[in-house]
Image (spheres, rainbow, N blue to C red):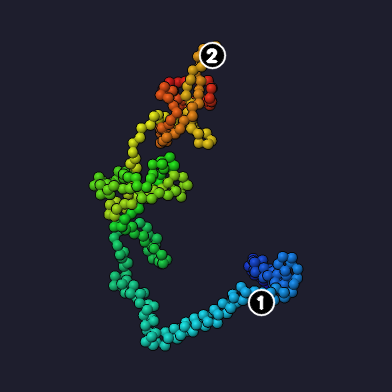
Amino acid sequence: MRKRKMWVGYLFILPSFVGVLLFVLIPYIDVVRRAFMQTASGQFVGLLNFKSILHNKAFLLAFTNTGRFVGVCIPVLLVLSLGIAVSLAKQTAYAEILKTGFVEQQLSALKELQSAEGKVVSPMDGVVSAVNIQVGGMTSGTADILIADISAEMMLKVQFSEENKEHVIVGANVKLISDVLMETEKNAVGKLKITAIQQNTETGAGVEASIRIPPNTLPIGTSIGVQIETSKKMYSGCIPLEALHQEEGNQYYVYTTDEKKTILGTEVIARRVDVTVEYKGDRYAAVKGLSVNQNIILSSSKQISDGGRIKPQKQ
């Protein structure tokens, strides 16, 4: 039974022993072996490496600097540390000054806490946004309670999709959209502008715009949206998105209808027309390359191709 317990103990220390053997002992032995070998050929050279390093200027400089540090800095630090410790232990006037300097700040904080009957009060007004501690728990040394300061300037971060990022420019006017805000609150915010733009790091697509909000204008936690004020532009043609197709190389095209006369009569066929997209929204796209009288194909129950016969259904 005793031998079994002994082997169990060895098994517990085996992983640690293997780690020390692989990462400490074996590399150390290899370093000692290489010290007596030539680097390039691996030939045994004895003490030749040690003799050559004693004539190396870089090594001698490093050795001298290390000797100065060990001979000067370390003794001075030890003497100063020991002297301060002895002074503090002897309860001298100098020791009282040192102690006061070390603990004055902590004593001041404890006195303020005692005078407030153990209540910790925030130095500013605001709204509690996060509580990271429970009743009876110990403080972690970091921020246990977060308070949003509504008296300071706020920064609104808004994410825009890849399709709409062309309208997001620095200096563009934006308008708040919210069912919660009153008109007086919207007017209090005033004219807002986009102050900075960066790539959306969360999704990798689109952009994130920064908008400065004046202090004391919006309640904390209010859900709002923004609308960018853009200049109006007339487009020559707009089509539904379902009629727009895209191939590799970002070439856009649509299918239009055309008539072809055959021996059986007139057939309706599909024609591919390449277009240039000027603007692409959520439902419609503005394109160039189509004439006014061309009929476009919105959708099809079968796959269509350029020149393929179709049976159109008017909508």
Name the residue: 37% across, 58% down.
130
- Residue 54 — which label? 1
Circle 2 — which element? strand
Q: Give the class, few, some or many, for how many residues have Cα within 10 Å of label 2's Cα (few <14, many ≥20).
A: few
Earlier sequence position, callout 1 versus callout 2: 1
Which percent across, then down, holds residue 100?
36, 80
Residue 126 vertical position relative to residue 274 in the rendered view, above or below? below
**Which is more toward the observer, 116 or 6?**
116
In which quadrant of the rendered view does residue 234 lie? top left
Q: Which image quarter is the C terminus in? A: top left
Circle 1 — which element? loop
Residue at the extreme left of the image, as rendered? 184
Which percent across, then down, holds residue 277?
44, 34
Q: Give the class, few, some or many, for how many residues have Cα within 10 Å of label 1's Cα (few <14, many ≥20).
A: few
Res. 49 visible in picture: yes
- Residue 292 — which label? none
Which percent across, then down, holds residue 137?
40, 65
Taking 192 as reference, is 70 left or right?
A: right
In which quadrant of the rendered view does residue 90 lie? bottom left
Name the residue: 54% across, 13% down.
262
Q: Which image quarter is the N terminus in? A: bottom right
Name the residue: 66% across, 66% down.
22
What's under tag 2, amino acid-wise? Thr
Name the residue: 47% across, 82% down.
81
Labels 1 and 2 touching (C-beta < 8 A):
no
- Residue 262 — which label? 2
**Which is more toward the observer, 312 or 145?**
312
**Which is more toward the observer, 132 or 269?**
269
Res. 157 visible in picture: no
Q: Nearer the viewer, mark 1 or mark 2?
A: 1
